[in-house]
Every structure is written in structure tokens, then in C-alpha cells.
Image: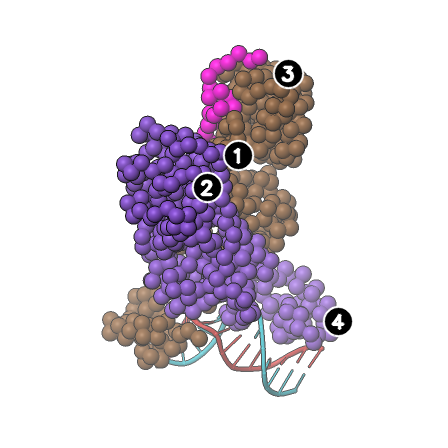
Chain colours: A purple, B brown, C red, D cyan
DNA sequence: TTGTAGGCGTTATCAA
DNA sequence: TTGATAACGCCTACAA
């Protein structure tokens, strides 16, 4: 089909070794023969076969990307950050959508292994044991982006979720609230669950508010659960709520409305993630934003270092998050709670 | 490093040929030896090397995706559609962001060629000659998603842009408008430019409104240009405007406000693409939506057929678009124009 | 400076 | 039914 190194060699009347040399411009080769080879390349329309090359040198300059869902907010930005840096270092990217399904995650890691990627960037709320094990079998550098395995064995790039939750709750406290509910992620989720609960507790304690377990309800990142959770919190007369995701915050607001109360007039709500919904929902939702692009870019940069076996100063990078104030907390104007 | 087919062969005391046979379960091989091989595979932890395999069989089961920007609205959905179908047919995906820059497009196509992808899906407003030429040199199946080369040489999946523009303008006419401005895409863009202008003309003609070239101003998909274009249209006292993109529609609305007029009270505006901005801008913008996921899914399905050399019934697939009515046309309530 | 030849890990053709 | 062995296209000692 298309020309190979052999055709070029024949055309230039040299050995394939010489052709290979000019291709990789390894020092030693006369200007004259180099010219001949270059012409032959042009004439034959030769394009190197990266497959053959990779097979030989045992490097593909390709990395795998495992992402829950490229069409859901947050990830496109992360992926763009990754791709920009990857392009800079001449890496190509395999994109794999898992919907956070364990079987898909494992299967994709295996496929990426077979395709001999040089490294992998993993995204997904929780890092399952089977995933970790598959990574280990495969033995290629892995970076966790926006997440972390529970033993912190893998390098990671993320925000400080505890601090983020802390900031969200502290902000509610600064608005004068004392009775603050928490609609949390699942308890088995170290990041979206536990860490954010921890931040919630810390903020309360640090401001002399007693922690009341009744005010913490598991929403599991499901809107239906969050709705019910909010109804329950209303029984305790909370005057503000921090939800561990924007979706849950929106569901909570719906529950509040359905109980004939208003946001922000009666209750203040803060979400998490700065997703699309936090901007289009009425009222718009105050939330925590992660620096998506940077998480991607830094992750990829970290991976390139790993691949080049350069020393890395920091295995676990923490990037700054940001509180975005919107209507659901009255844009920060203090109010008397009802 | 990791086990190869040779190690398995040694372990199972058979030839590598036999191992290969059980791997590809090619018919002839005793149950007994098959068992031995299977055990050996497990014992050695053997994982096939797709590179070597691809080199041999001249197929990588990998396809390249050329997209302007995965982090900008519309594309994530398309890509998800592609990936879902790709996964279904066991194809993996290389993601390439080009920012619509010619050099990046060409360079990525070349790289994809070197990496021996089996096919490519191309996205981008205009399909440049250099891109077409690079595709031709490379000689691999290509599908255009959401776009089309001007000679229609490549298979494509997209909406009917002329009809979409027609529908948008017809809708404005149905609201009682007679003097309708058009802020178009660039004239050298067959799709976002010419086709939408054509639809605009048709709608007018079909409803007995004379086409006035003065009411068509080139916005080139740039907000600054669109702003100025709108100011010009205001001089002609238009009572409605169709902009060939949401961004331009938003810019136009700003121009209208800055001229002390109101949307939708004084002037109605329709955009194009149903991007993020059309939902968060105040007023929210009536617009045309493309079926992004389906464009991706159908494109990939088409590509799989091409790759399998199956006959394809339709080289150029047209998918249905949709008019989404929002505040910028008063949610469709008829108004007297000022 | 250039060429020869072995090998990267598979598949597939031929014999046996 | 199984085993040698020649590719696939490239890189890289080692020789010349």
C-alpha cells in the first residue's frame, strides 16, 4: 500500500539503516546521502509507521484517559487541559468514557494496556480496588485527576475537598446562619462523602457551633435522595444547607419550594462543582468551583515527568478552589433568617 | 517485561503458532492443548500486544477524532455519541483538538496517519483544501460530522442548515415581523455562511417579503463584528434579527440594549446552536438546536460501515434540527413591534 | 560513513 | 492437529 522505509531505501540507493538514520537524524550521515534520502522520501510519499516504530522502541507516545462522561460538565475542560499539555510533549490521547461503571473502567484499562499506552490519567469519584489492581498488573504510570485512591499510592491532582466544604460552610456561617444542614455524598466515597463532611464539621466547630448528626443526611449524589433529605432537614428547621453537589442543591431547593418556603429569602443553599445547572437553575446556585483546566494540565504535566523519569517534587498536588456566590445565598447580602 | 506469546508457548510446551490459534480461537485445536494454553496464559499473566497484532494485520481498531475544541459546547455531546458507538464496535478513539487552526488540523491528520488509524471523523466549520488533500494522501475512510466539504466528496452527517435558517426566519415571520435582519457567518463559509443566508432568503420570498441585501450583514461569528452589524441594522429599523450563532445573537442584544431598545419588547432575536450562552444570557435566546449526540453516533456508525466495506445507503445523512423558543422572542407570544 | 542482520510480538502459510 | 518460519515496518548493535 503506502511506501515503507524499504521503498525509500531502494529509491535512494542506500540501505534502510541509512534511511532510518536520517529519519531520526542520528548524527552520522553525509549531507549528500541525506539529500538523496530526503528526495526519495518526498518522491515516494513515505510516511513512517508509528506502530512498527513503537513496537521496536517500546514506547507509543500515547496515553489513555479514563473519564466518567465527556459530555457532563467539568470533564471537557479537564480533558482540554490534558490535551493541550499532551500536544506540547507530543503525546496522543485515547479517550475512554466509563460512566463510572466498574466493568467499563477495568475493561478500558486492559485495552489501554494492550494498546501499550505509556501512561494513564484516571478520573472518577471513587477509585475501586479492582481498578487499582488492574493498574498494578499493568504497571504503567498513572495519575489521578480530580480524585484520589484511598491509600494515596498514585500521584494525584485535585482540590482540597475538606477545605472547600469548610469554606462553603464558613461562608454560610458568615451570613449569620447557625443551623446548617448538610446533604452529603455517599459515606463510602472518601472524597465527595467523607472529606466534605469533615470540612463541614470543622467549620462548625471552629465557629463554636455544636455539631448535630441529625443535620447530616446522605444524598448520595442522587436528586431523589437529596429531595427527601431536604424534607427531613426542614423538620429540624435548618436555616441554611450545604449540598455536596449542584444537582443535590437544586433538588433541595425544589423541596424547599414545595414546602412553601423560598430561597434565598427563607433558606440559603450552597452547592458544589459549579456545573451548568448551578448557572441556569432559578435561583442560580452559590457553589464551589474546581479549576478544571488546570487539574487536567497539571495532571498531564505530572505524567510527562513520570514518563521521563524526572524527579517529581510533589506526588499529590492541591490546586486552589473558589467560592462562587450567586442568588441562592442572596448574593451575599445578609438577611435575617426567617 | 511482561509476558509474550513466546513465554506462554514455552510454559504450555506448544509452539507460538498454537498459542496464537487459541488466542484467536481459530477452529482447529484440541480441547486438551487449549486448556494447557489457557492455563499458561493465566500463569504467565500474558496480555496480548495490540501493537504487534496491528502491525501484522494492518488494522488498529482505532479511529481519530478531529474536533475544534472539546471544551466548547456542542462537541462533548458529539464525541460522546461517537465514543458510545465506537465502544460498541470495539474501536478506540484518539482525541485531537485543533481550535480550527489549519496547521493543527493538518498536523493531526498526519500523526493519525502515522499511528495507522483505521478511519477519521472530522469536525470543524470549514473544510480546507489542505485538509482534504492530506486526507487524500492518507487514503483512509473519513466522515464529516456536523460539517461538509464543499464538493461533498466525503460522507457527512449534519443538519440541513438552510432549512434550519429557513425555520428560524419563518418563525420570526409568524410572529408578525416583516423587517428581519440577518447577521451571517463569513461568506467563505459554505455552511455557517452561505447556506444559512440562503434559508433566510427562501423564508422571506416564500412569505412575500422582498429580500433586501442591506439587511444582511456579515458577522463572521465574531461578537465584535456582530455588535457593529446590529448597530447598522438598527439604522434600518429592523424589528427582528436572526443571527447565525448564539454568540452573535448575544452581541446583537447588547447592541440593542446599548441603543436604548429592549429585547423582546422592541426587537426579537433568534440565535443558532443552542449553546450554553443562549441559556444563561438574559434574556435567554431563542435558537436552533442540533442533535449533537446523534450526529456523533450516526457518524461513527457510518464509519464502521465504511470500515467493514458494507454498502452504505446514504453518503450524506441529514438529521432533524429543532427550534427552541426562549425569552428573546417573548416565548412566542405575539407582540406588536414597536 | 554506510550496510548487514537480528529482533520487537504477532499472524498466517506451509509442511509435517 | 501442530510446528517452523516468513512476514509486518522499523531500530540498532556490530561489521565493514
Q: For the residues tagged 1 and 4, is the chain the same?
A: no
Asked which secondary structure carries label 1, the reply is helix
Mark 2–mark 4 distance (CA, rounded to whole Å)? 76 Å
Tell which tag, 1 or 4, sits nearer the viewer: 1
Magenta region includes residue B109? no
Q: Which chain is mark 2 on? A: A
Residue at point 42%, 59% (across, down): A148
Residue that mark 3 sits on: B237
Q: Which chain is mark 1 on? A: B
Q: Residues within 10 Å of mark 2 (few under 14, many from 20)?
A: few
Question: What are the residue bounds of the magenta stretch?
Answer: B317-338
Residue that mark 2 sits on: A174
Residue that mark 4 sits on: A32
Q: Residues within 10 Å of mark 1 (few under 14, many from 20)?
A: some
Q: Residues within 10 Å of mark 4 (few under 14, many from 20)?
A: few
Residue that mark 1 sits on: B277
Residue at point 73%, 67% (across, down): A35
Amino acid at each position: 500500500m503506502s511506501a515503507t522505509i524499504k521503498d525509500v531505501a531502494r529509491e535512494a540507493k542506500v540501505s534502510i539503516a541509512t534511511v532510518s538514520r536520517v529519519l531520526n537524524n542520528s548524527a552520522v550521515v553525509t549531507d549528500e546521502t541525506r539529500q538523496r534520502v530526503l528526495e526519495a522520501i518526498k518522491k515516494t510519499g513515505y510516511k513512517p509507521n508509528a506502530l512498527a516504530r513503537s513496537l521496536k522502541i517500546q514506547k507509543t507516545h500515547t496515553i489513555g484517559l479514563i473519564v466518567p462522561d465527556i459530555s457532563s460538565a467539568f470533564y471537557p475542560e479537564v480533558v482540554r487541559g490534558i490535551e493541550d499539555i499532551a500536544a506540547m510533549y507530543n503525546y496522543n490521547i485515547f479517550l475512554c468514557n466509563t460512566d463510572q461503571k466498574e466493568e467499563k473502567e477495568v475493561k478500558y484499562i486492559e485495552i489501554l494496556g494492550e494498546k501499550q499506552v505509556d501512561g494513564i490519567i484516571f478520573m472518577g469519584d471513587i477509585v475501586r480496588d479492582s481498578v487499582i489492581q488492574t493498574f498494578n498488573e499493568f504497571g504503567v504510570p498513572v495519575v489521578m485527576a480530580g480524585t484520589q485512591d484511598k491509600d494515596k499510592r498514585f500521584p494525584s491532582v485535585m482540590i482540597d475537598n475538606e477545605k472547600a466544604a469548610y469554606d462553603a460552610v464558613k461562608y454560610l456561617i458568615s451570613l449569620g446562619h447557625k443551623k446548617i444542614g448538610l446533604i452529603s455524598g455517599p459515606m463510602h466515597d472518601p472524597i465527595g462523602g467523607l472529606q466534605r463532611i469533615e470540612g463541614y464539621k470543622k467549620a462548625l466547630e471552629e465557629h463554636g457551633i455544636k455539631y448535630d448528626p441529625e443535620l447530616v443526611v446522605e444524598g448520595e449524589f442522587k436528586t431523589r435522595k437529596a429531595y427527601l433529605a431536604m424534607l427531613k432537614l426542614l423538620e429540624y428547621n435548618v436555616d441554611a444547607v450545604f449540598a455536596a453537589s449542584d444537582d443535590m442543591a437544586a433538588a433541595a431547593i425544589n423541596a424547599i419550594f414545595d414546602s412553601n418556603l423560598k430561597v434565598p429569602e427563607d433558606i440559603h443553599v450552597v452547592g458544589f462543582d459549579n456545573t451548568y445547572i448551578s448557572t441556569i437553575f432559578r435561583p442560580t446556585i452559590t457553589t464551589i468551583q474546581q479549576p478544571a483546566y488546570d487539574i487536567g494540565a497539571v495532571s498531564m504535566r505530572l505524567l510527562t515527568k513520570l514518563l521521563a523519569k524526572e524527579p517529581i517534587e510533589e506526588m499529590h498536588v492541591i490546586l486552589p478552589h473558589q467560592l462562587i456566590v450567586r442568588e441562592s445565598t442572596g448574593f451575599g447580602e445578609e438577611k435575617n433568617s426567617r
